[in-house]
Amino acid sequence: MRIRTLLYYIITGFIIGTITLVLVQYITSNNVKELISSNENLLQEYKVSNELVRLQKDLLLLDNKTKTAVITGDSTQIKDFKLGIIKVREDLDNLKKTDGEIASLKYMQELDALINQKIVFSHQMVDSFYRAGRPASENILATDHGLKLSETITNLTHKIDTSGRIALAQKIKYVDKSGQRVLDWNYYIILLVLFLFTAVFLIIVNRMKKQAELINQLNTSEKKLKEAAQIKENFLANMSHEIRTPLNAILGYTHLLQRKNLDKETMLHVCTVHKSGETLLSIVNDILDLSKIESGMMRIEMAPFNIRAVIHAVTAMFHHKIEEKNLELFISIATDIPETLSGDATRLTQILVNLLGNAVKFTSKGSISLDIYKKTESSEAILIGFRISDTGIGIETEKLETIFERFRQAEDSTTRKYGGTGLGLSIVRDLVYLQHGNIDVESSSGKGTKVSFSISYRKPAGQNKNTISENNVILPNFKPDLKILIVEDNEINQGLMSRFLQEWNMHYSIAGNGKKAIELIENEYFDLVFMDIQMPEMDGYSAAHHIRQKLELDIPIVAMTANAMAGEREKCMALGMNDYLSKPVRESALIDMINRYSDSIFSIRSFKKEKSDLENDFLVINLHYMKEISKGDRDYEKLVTEQFITLLPKELSALSEAFTNQDNENLKRIGHNMKTSISIMGLDNLLSENLDIIESENPDKETLATSVTNVIRIGNEAILEANQFYLTL
């Protein structure tokens, strides 16, 4: 029984019970009133009967006193005679005062007349005694008139008494019936109360029984839900591993193939395969993001970032599509927003990419606006508001409540026409909520959509400003004797890792599982171990635990797994591993990991410009390399400078277009080629790290956007300075 139904039953029972009790009380009250009235009438009948008896007694006394007064002639008896008359009149008056509804009262007038006659007759006797003497009064007494009056009065009082007794009997019978009715209604009330108590008791017992059953069902459901969640997590972990493992090979080998001199058709096929792999990886990542959000393991990082660089990078991604659809993009960033904030730039980028992507997708004409403004500010934090508005197809008002649900779009036709899985907005909402923000959407069909959200960011303790005059640059300088152990059961991934390490002229060994890895480590020395997790015979967890506990070695171990589920990194760290590398393995990430755990693999140098001559008079370009090659040949310097001024703008434009179109293959190719173009002007120190990121496998969106922005900005500044230098030649 549902709570609402039970509530209806309780309210209905209460109303019925209340009405019944009121009705019973009303009937009982009437019966009690009738009983009281009957009792009063009964008392009145008793009073009439008593008054009749008293009247008869006083009449008899009056007769006796009259006769005594006449016979004896004693004056004192005359006085008693008068008192007797007064007493009879009082009795008659009291009898008249009884309730007129009594049946015997119909004889009262006749009785009154007879008693008055009796009194008059008695006065005649006494008066004749005083006027004519005793004989006269005896003559009146000898007549039968007085006797007849007495008999008549006696008969009449008897009638009155008889009628009173009949009425009294009826009243007694009626009183008995009224009392019985009251008693019956008391029984009914008791039965009703017992019924209601029994019903309430049964309802409560039944409710408690059902509640106990529901609790058992909930416990069972909770247990099954936990089991299902565990099965789901295991499935996603296995799915992640099984999909990412071949994806690692696909993306890795296609990346290597892109470096080869392939014919145009083959290169197109390779790029298509690589792009399809990246698309599939993006879908897998979306699903894993949902899983992390559901399990509460989605991490929100707190790190300084340049919000304007993020906005620029995100909008640059859609530049080409906006131009292609002939749309206008308006960007407004409030001037009172700090340059650097502390928060999760990656999640902000993910949110903006989804929302701007939808705006571009669903807008065929008109404009798109992105407004960033400050809502509130404290000494430690600032609440930033974001508003994305478009003039697209809009959303029906009744659909707004479900627009953030997973796998839901405004219309089924939307999916067919525009594509998409319906996960984007759900992830956006969850990411905003995870950062303790709010999100709201306003729209109507055919009038565009406005999505607003706000996130609070911390203010960094100090503003880190990047300067061009001084940079810390990481340059490759591999140790020739470095030896690495690759523990991987998948032959394709073994081949991919081997290819990377061969290109870098590094020494390495391969073990197919944890057991073989332990055997190699027991017999050989290794500087670094890359350990896969899911392997036959002995997995990576057990192997790492054995190396730490049994062999007692502190060799750096980097987990290398396609399982991207939440908590995987912590589990690896807890079992003695030093770090975590997610598959597909990116070349730049692999280099960074080797650099992190191997001594003197990379040397770090600080470059400071010295303005001692012409070649160091510029802030961006460095002419030292050109001067070294030209050896004073100004024609050569003019030629290469002209080539730089002509070539670099085209490459920067192509780089921006590839980034906007998310053409990662072309982006990497351009980044790789630019390394040669910029070297003549000494830009390696400024751009090599950014170009490495652009050329790397699957860099995160924020880092990639920042790198592209830096390359374009520094490149444009270099072109201006190159033009200035060209004028001096």
Image (spheres, rainbow, N blue to C red):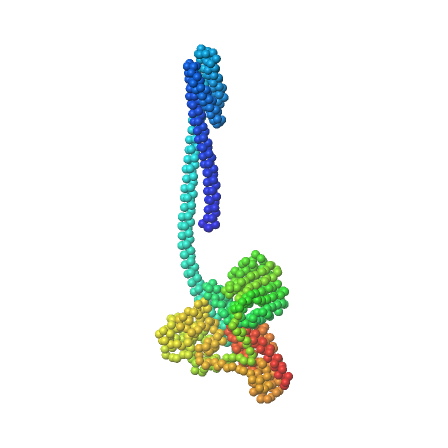
Q: Residue furthest right?
A: 727
Please tell me in which quadrant of the rendered image residue 618 appears.
bottom right
In this view, the residue in front, 326 or 78, is 78
Q: Exactly how many numbered labels are in the figure?
A: 0
Front-most of residues 117 and 216 = 117
Looking at the image, residue 462 sits to the left or right of residue 175; the answer is right
Q: Position of residue 581 (x, y in %)?
A: 45, 73
**Residue 590 at what x, y percent from top left?**
47, 76
Compare residues 84 and 501 and report the one nearer the observer.
Answer: 84
For residue 236, above or below residue 82: below
> Could you tell me which residue is drawn at 46 percent across and 13 percent down?
129
Task: Farthest residue to the bottom: give it.
Answer: 632
Q: Quadrant of the C terminus?
A: bottom right
Residue found farthest to the front: 75
Kindly indicate the quadrant of the structure image that contains residue 536: bottom left
Q: Nearer the viewer, residue 588 or 35?
A: 35
Residue drawn at 48 percent across, 22 percent down: 108
Q: As drawn, which residue projects farthest toward the left?
A: 550
Q: Is residue 104 above or below residue 317?
A: above
Can residue 716 be seen by looking at this rendering? yes
Residue 156 visible (yes or no): no
Q: In x, y percent, where is residue 322?
A: 61, 68
Residue displayed at 54% across by 60% down:
403
As drawn, 16 above or below 340: above
- Residue 574 is situated, as x and y percent measured from the top left of the image, at 40, 70
